Amino acid sequence: MAAADPAPSQPVHGTVPPTAGLPLRAGDLLPGNVRLDAALAHFLGVESTQIACSGTAAFVAALTALSRLSPERDTVIVPAYTCPLMALAVAHCGLRLALCDLRAGSPDLDPAHLQSLCDTRTLAVVPTHLAGRVADVASALRIARAAGAWVVEDAAQALGARVGGRSVGLQGDIGFFSLAVGKGLTIFEGGVLLARDPELREACAAALREQARPASWRRRLAGHAWDLRRSVELLGYWALYRPGPLGWAYLRPLRHALEQGDWVAAAGDDFGAYIPLHGVGRWRRGVGARALARLPDFLERTRARALRRIARLARIPGVRVLGDSPAAEGAAGTWPVLLVTMPTAHSRDALLREGWGAGDGLGLPFAHALADYAAYRHAVPRAAPGELPHARDLASRLLSISNSPWLDDARFHAVCEAVEACADRRGTAARSHA
Ligand SMILES: *Cc1c(COP(=O)(O)O)cnc(C)c1O
């Protein structure tokens, strides 16, 4: 533990990862039969969980199950600022996507807009616990229910987040988490699915079984190849998720993307249209289950660090740190990053241009609002200029500051000074243009 989380005064040299991922230890890699689904169920305080090969695959399974239960419905409503993989998953399932605007300055779905989108075609509404921030699921649930639609909680980045003493993902019909790199606990790529209702749980389990054991032997073979590849990648994560090697594994490609001016690639948003669907082998499950034993302690330290640092950031004029939704009573989110809004798009872009490539933990959750990626036009409905104003405003002013333990206090303070300088400069920039 001491190796993973040095005392704040202890300087760490090298690259800070963009989020606080739980580092693996050599002991996690031993073979042995540990049940990840049961270990996660214990951690989350639920009866059972289901394992998928990614968060996206868990979402695909959820949509598959819901489509079978409500075949007359075909539209999925997601926040207009979310992971583009959600749009690709909806397209993969042959369903229609609808984009819901956000509440001003918040990742929550805007209830009035959601209300106007929900109708008899709505299959599911997807409130999203963005970057560990607990979302307002209750409003989404009330509006979806009135239209006869289901609610799927996207908790991809929120494993360990709680609301009213229970895990997120349990207020809606289905919840899912991601076990991808950078989302906290990782098996390189993986997903976890929760469903409270037994009938729904069985429908999801059936969809996941079809992913893991497809009828054709070719696809089964391809699935084993994917799991093998992920196993090698997981070993790479163990070897390289350290401040030194991360310069090579993360910072070098990031700087390359920035030199090309490609913020979509820099944010890690450059996804292929193909969604691998396969099983997760025993070895990776065991690695995840053993690392999970350290997660509660890691999350606790991460939370304490976040609360200290929010207090520092909150003193900067014009800068806001996003908290859990005020509408989510008893929320206690997780803190892989601090989500910060700058006063203007101009000041946000200036800060990223100066600081993103430094390896000090600055980053972008997602490069654009969903409607504004050139690469995903085939999967996303058009939005005219002026539509989805709050999602686009958030996308233009938001950035993330890593909450990795490797961002020591001295470097965090240097980041704060850069934030402050850019936040302040907007006034100067506006004046000099005048
Ligand atoms: C990462 C992410 C996903 C997708 O999860 P994967 O495990 O990467 O497939 C979905 N939603 C959000 C908000 C995410 O951050």
Image (cartoon, rainbow, N blue to C red):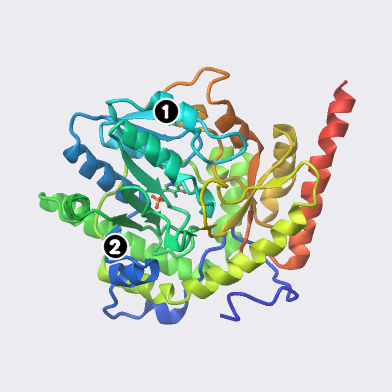
Q: Position of residue 136 (x, y in %)?
A: 48, 45
Q: Nearer the viewer, residue 15 or 294?
A: 294
Which label's residue is closer to the chain start, 2 or 1? 2
Task: Please state the horizontal and vertical placement of residue 307, each as a whole percent of the image.
Answer: 67, 62
Nearer to us of marks 2 and 1 is 1
Q: Which image quadrant for residue 410? A: bottom right
| Three-letter amino acid code of the residue under disc 1 | Gln
Residue 305 shows up from this direction: yes
User: Where is residue 104 drawn, in percent x and y?
Assistant: 60, 34
Q: Quadrant of the N terminus?
A: bottom right
Residue at 17% over, 39% down: 68
Image position of 2 (left or right of 121): right
Give, as a three-letter code, the residue at label 2: Thr
Q: Secondary structure at mark 2?
A: loop
Marks 2/1: CA–CA distance: 31 Å
Residue at disc 2, CB closer than 8 Å to ligand 1 = no
At x 33% / y 60%, what residue is drawn?
229
Residue that numbered label 2 is attached to: 49
- Judge left or right: residue 243 versus residue 88: right
Image quarter (top left, top right, bottom left or bottom right) of the C terminus: top right
- State the mark number for residue 115: 1
Residue 406 is at least partly visible in this image = no
